[in-house]
Image (spheres, rainbow, N blue to C red):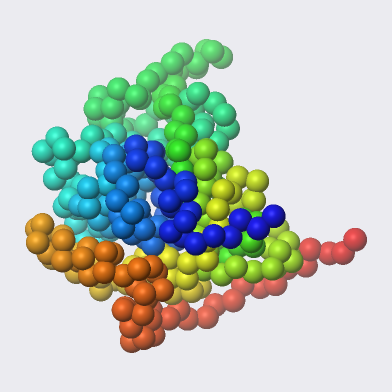
Amino acid sequence: MSKLTSLSEAIHQHVHDGDLVYAAGFTHLIPFAAGHEIIRQGIKNLTLARATPDLIYDQMVAAGCARKVIFSYSGNPGVGSLKWLRDGMQNGSLEWEEYSHFGMISRLQAGASGLPFMPMRQTGALDLEKANPLYRRVADPYGGEDVVVVPALCPDVAIVHVQRADSEGNAHIWGILGEQREAAFAAKRVILTAEEIVDADVIRSDPNRTLIPSLVVSAVCHVPWCAHPSYTQGYYDRDNELYLRWEEISKDEASMQAYLDEWVYGVKDREEYMAKLGEDTRERLKPGVRLSAPVNYGSY
């Protein structure tokens, strides 16, 4: 059964005030368009969880969507910190929990597996254990050294961007694989955004690339360029110019509000956003071509 809907309708139906939202994607496939739609719809008091908050959570914090962040690295990669997220944590207006990358993914793995917690090897991150009381130690029942455990993370909604999906929500992902699968299986509801909607036969032709199955997906949205200024492997490159400019854009309330007014509130949807971005930028971000070798799955 088709689960195709517009992004605005998917956000309206599946994201509610006070929800715990996980926007997946590591380095690429970051669902910026979904974050912008949450801002436009004025959804508030969210707990925003993500291994790397990136610019999208800085924007959502600045827009007043968040009451808490759960993360394992916070920053504008290669540039500096995320000003609005950092200031909110420092002035006490934003609650927060910090984990190592492995700790964050372990929480999702526990949630995806239906377990109350996930054990980890002891690491050098002793300061995190001191700062975060949700890190615990338990005795190894088989007689080894104590193990560190972290609680399951079960988002109310996970937002996962993919290269292509069919209308039922079976989806292909390639390139850098982040925590998309774990987040999708751990969440109560999943909004899937895709660069392309393809026939089911295309998805079935390469089952090993199907990281997200339809059985966990609540809504499917066709959203080309959803990840800009992040990138989608094979579709468009990372907009490094915007990442570099973010330091200036986010420096004060006036410049941040001007950005939100122009690029979030000032456009109806991602299609208008990309029209405003312009053909020159889209051409600049056009990826090169490097095809993978074909595989033979055999016949029956």
Establish if 24 lies above or below 110. below
Indicate the quadrant where residue 67 lies.
Answer: top left
Outermost residue, right direction?
300
Q: Residue at x 31, y 58 (%)?
A: 40
Looking at the picture, tell me which residue is in the foreground, 79 or 258.
258
Residue 200, image x and y in percent?
71, 64
Q: Residue at x 39, y 62 (%)?
A: 33
Looking at the picture, tell me which residue is in the foreground, 138 or 233.
233
Q: Is the N terminus in the top left, top right, bottom left or bottom right quadrant?
A: bottom right
Residue 188, image x and y in percent?
52, 38
Q: Residue at x 43, y 65 (%)?
A: 226
Tell me if residue 176 can be seen.
Answer: no
Total numbered circles: 0
Looking at the picture, tell me which residue is in the foreground, 9 or 71.
9
Establish if 147 lies above or below 239. above
Q: Is residue 119 left or right of residue 50?
A: right
Q: Residue at x 36, y 75 (%)?
A: 272
Q: Is residue 158 left or right of residue 58?
A: right
Residue 54, image x and y in percent?
30, 55
Residue 228, image x and y in percent?
37, 68
Establish if 181 lies above or below 147. below
Tell me if residue 10 can be seen.
Answer: yes
Q: Is the C terminus in the top left, top right, bottom left or bottom right quadrant?
A: bottom right
